[in-house]
Amino acid sequence: MVPQFSFSVFPFVVLFAVASAEVHELTHFTYSGEQGPDHWGSLSPSSSACSSGKSQSPVNIKKDEIVKSKDWKPLIRNYERANATLINNGFNVAVHYESDAGVLILDGKNYTLNGIHWHIPSEHQIDGVLYDAELHLVHQATSDKSLSVVSILFEYGDSDPFVAKLEGELDKLAKETCGEDEQAHIPLGTVDNRLLRKHTRNYYRYVGSLTTPPCTENVVWNILGKVRKISKEQVAALTAPLADVNKKNARPVQELNGRKVELYSELD
């Protein structure tokens, strides 16, 4: 797999489903070197928000600066079994759903679960702590196509049950080869997404952006407060399909620029 990726030709990449419709030129990016995060904003006009945007993601969540919300409700995530495909996008490993995988209900608004992908190490930090992995569950509103992402942080420990179901296919994906601007796909059949909806007593929310070009803003982020476990072997399997330049695929944290991170907690 080549270390570059063009986000103008990726029918399976759900995180950019909205923004990609507006992109008409090739924009290659990586996680280091001349096409790394420090240069994303100058790679093309369509990715200018990566450097000029004021509401970018990820961020460092400082617990002593958060605002506790008394109005929010628990995250309602009704996930189901769904047909899916495992994909090497070149810059991350993702699962795309071909059928209804369930919904996230946020402030009375329904968001459909379109896909998930992993970042190694984590992109978001809590009090400056960088975690070993981060899973993004990408949802798109059925009403206005806006995006909301649920983020799960991981630290090394026992195996993650969901990744455990994918280990055989991850090995196959690592053996696939493809040319520039191509993706490798492994059919998964039916995937049980109920493994992803474990209850959480608290979560953080803020408004940010996509964490890769074109860095489109107005994405609602929900970072779960409970840190889950993942094994070192599983993290190695999630990075094995990627080129060396993208094996560590976490964008550095961005300035809040006056934004507030709010906390919902059942204990308050």
Image (tube, helix red, strand yellow):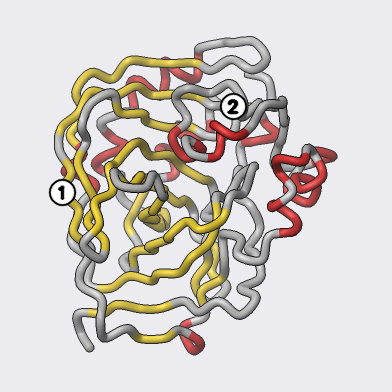
User: What quarter of the picture does the N terminus occupy?
Assistant: top right
Q: Which is more toward the observer, 203 or 205?
A: 205
Q: Is residue 216 left or right of residue 106?
A: right
Residue at 24%, 51% (x, y): give it: 110
N-term mark: 2 or 1: 1
Question: Could you say whether the residue bearing mark 2 is in a helix, strand or loop?
Answer: loop
| Residue at the disc numbered 2 | 90
Image coords of residue 33 (percent x, y): 82, 40
Q: Which is more toward the observer, 52 or 205?
A: 52
Residue at 56%, 33% (x, y): give it: 20
**Discs 2/1, front:** 1
| Residue at the disc numbered 1 | 78
Q: Is residue 204 above or below residue 186?
A: below
Q: Residues within 10 Å of mark 2 (few under 14, many from 20)?
A: many
Amino acid type shown at disc 2: Gly
Image coords of residue 123 (percent x, y): 55, 56
Image coords of residue 49 (percent x, y): 69, 52
Farthest residue toward the front?
144
Residue at 32%, 57% (x, y): give it: 228
Q: Is residue 127 left or right of residue 213?
A: left
- Across the whole image, how many numbered discs are drawn on residues? 2
